[in-house]
Amino acid sequence: MLRASGIKVSIGRATILRGVSLDVRPGEVVAVIGPNGAGKSTLLHVLSGARAPDDGVASLDGLPLERWRPHDLALRRAVLPQTPLLTFPFRVFDVVLLGRSCHAGRSSQHDDIEIAESALKQVDMVHLAERIYPTLSGGERQRVQLARVLAQVWRQSGANGEAGDTRYILLDEPTNNLDIGHQQTIMETARRFAADGFGVLAILHDPNLAAIHADRICVLSNGALVADGPPSAVMTQDLLQSIFNLPVAVLHHPENGRPIFFPLSSTHHEGEAYVFRHEPVPGAPGP
């Protein structure tokens, strides 16, 4: 289990995280939402081992992250940063292969190539494998970087691997710069890896993506964890209005029943009913 216990982080006089505690368990997708400046990315940096907290402990399988050897930690968790910086004229395929560098001496070149190809398939980027990375759009680069992350923690012997060898994927705003279709692709990929026994934590700006794809939603506000639970418990009108300082309506998805968040305009009248209407699309085939 990847765990944060009583995490406190300050920068100068500003307190960024205020005693935050949460777990990321094998087999689940945990989404962290909250307004800008709530401390979401800082929490991810602490859980990745990139930043030591001022107080509290971040641990993997009960061992504090600072006691893990960097190489061993790289085998167990991979991180997709918010703004990956890479300007060298590498091929897309070579960028994904970089994720296999921590496996040097543990896997063959043949296996590394096969895993990189599989990772590219997961993010629908095989057709751009020979493109030069800096020539890609922002959304395409994001998907390549996710493939690199997947390749890093990919298991050669099957998804579940050996007992006690759970792996974790930490995603900092993975849907940035992506169209709505590829946003769903990224989150569906996260769900598949969770189903295979990985633990996934994703920082998300869109509460609806969190509600649709996450097993649990953690809400940060002003550096504090104010909610942690399933979408049905967290995505309430009162909480979302308080966190985002915005009038909202919370409905339910017509197919899966999960809560859906809608901002309301200033012209909305209290008590007005909201319903899903299934209007026919002109020219579309009938049911």
Image: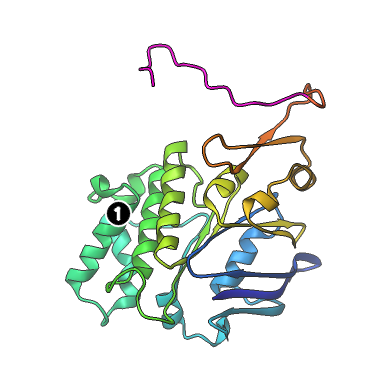
Q: How many marks?
A: 1
Look at the numbered disc 1 and give the secondary structure of its residue.
helix
Q: Magenta residues, as a range? A: 272-287
Q: Is residue 236 above or below residue 111?
A: above
Residue 14 shown left or right of residue 147 in the figure: right
> Residue 111 placed where, x, y %?
21, 70
- Per the image, the residue denoted by label 1 is 120
Q: Is residue 74 above or below residue 89?
A: below
Magenta part mainly helix, strand or loop? loop
Q: Residue furthest top?
A: 282
Q: Is residue 188 visible?
A: yes
Q: Residue furthest front?
A: 287
Residue 78 shown left or right of residue 136 in the figure: right
> Residue 98 placed where, x, y %?
32, 66
> Residue 18 placed where, x, y %?
77, 68
Q: Is residue 112 above or below residue 252?
A: below
> Residue 230 placed where, x, y %?
63, 56
Q: How is the image coloured?
A: rainbow
For image coordinates 36% across by 72% down, the residue present is 160
Q: Is residue 88 magenta?
A: no
Dot 1 amino acid type: Leu
Q: Is residue 273 magenta?
A: yes
Quarter-of-image position of residue 52: bottom right
Residue 262 shown left or right of residue 82 in the figure: right
For image coordinates 54% across by 70% down, the residue present is 25
For image coordinates 30% across by 48% down, the residue present is 125
Quarter-of-image position of residue 148: bottom left
Which one is in front, 229 or 173? 229
